[in-house]
Image (spheres, rainbow, N blue to C red):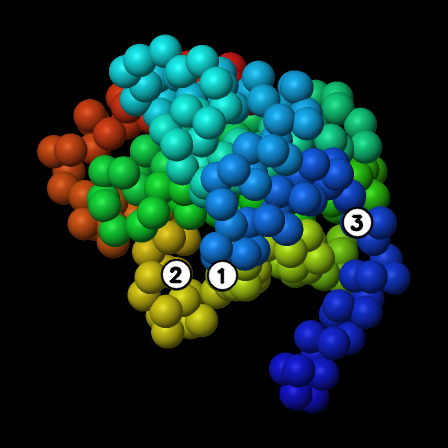
Amino acid sequence: MSSAVQKSQLDDLLARTLELPVLPATTQKVLGLMSDPDVSIEKVKRLVSTDPGLTAKILKVANSAFYGSYRNIQNLSQAILRLGLNAVRNIVVATSMKNVYKRFGLAEKLIWEQMIGSALAASVIARHTRTVDPEDAFIGGLLHDIGKVVINNEYPERFAKVIERVYNEQVSFEAAEKDVFEFSQRDVGAFVVKKWGFPETLELLIKFFDDKEALSRDKQLAHLVAIIALSDRMCQKFGMGWRKGGGSEVSFGNLPEILGLDETVMPQLSESVKSVFEQGAELY
């Protein structure tokens, strides 16, 4: 069976099986605007200004230490100029993510913490390596596990069984989900971001996140995946989201080496990420 046919069948299965979450109207419109490479700051400002809550959030983030603010920004135009359009898009998306959950108990809270933690850490690591746009790292970190949100929405009891196996039997999430679902959370995540209208690069990042052979053919994508994978390890190490064998037991493996990070810089980088977790998580 050809890969094209397999993909068609998978997309059909997902469309029939899952109720895909709908993003808030303003978020959808912002993503639509951002798909135009010639979009103006004025257009984005006019759209965002129709949502007072979103406007307040952007101003709050623009004035935060996370974006290195050095002066008080008082209006939306200044905030957009300070942050850049990609950062504004990411703030809008991150702010809307809690709306895709059908419920928000402990399990959902832990998934959310992992998502925002990975986004924040990936942005910090990307700034340090200077090989990937920090905003690409942020959105990749935020959404690379979005499939878990959708599967948990639709099948909370089956999802709970997968998590139980991961933590009690020390197996990977990928291995555990194969015994429960006909599809992977990566399949679901790639399908969702495509339907939401994100760029194909994000769809590919999610789809091939665990596929070393596919990543070997795209060094830039592989590098971004490595940044996000290291971000996930830091979330685990510092208690952002799911907690499993945390603290000193968490190893970064060969990820720092892949990213060209010398052992001597890792303690400082880790402290920077911890600081961002303490400050940045409260922004969202």
Task: Give the image quarter of residue 267.
Answer: top left
* Residue 197, placed above or below residue 58: below
Measuring from the top left, give residue 130's x and y in whole percent. 23, 45
User: Which residue is rendered at x = 24% and y = 29% of the image?
Assistant: 269
* Residue 217, placed above or below residue 219: below
Distance from Cα at disc 3 to Cα at disc 2: 26 Å
Check whether the beta carbons of the residues at disc 3 and disc 1 lie within 8 A of each other: no
Check whether the beta carbons of the residues at disc 1 and disc 2 lie within 8 A of each other: yes
- SS at mark 3 in the image: loop
User: Which residue is rendered at x = 36% and y = 29% of the image?
Assistant: 82
Of mark 1 and mark 2, the one earlier in the sequence is 1
| Residue behind mark 1 | 201
Task: Give the image quarter of residue 256.
Answer: top left
Measuring from the top left, give residue 243's x and y in whole percent. 53, 26
Of mark 3 and mark 2, the one earlier in the sequence is 3
| Residue 126 visible, this angle | yes
Say left or right for 76 vs 125. right
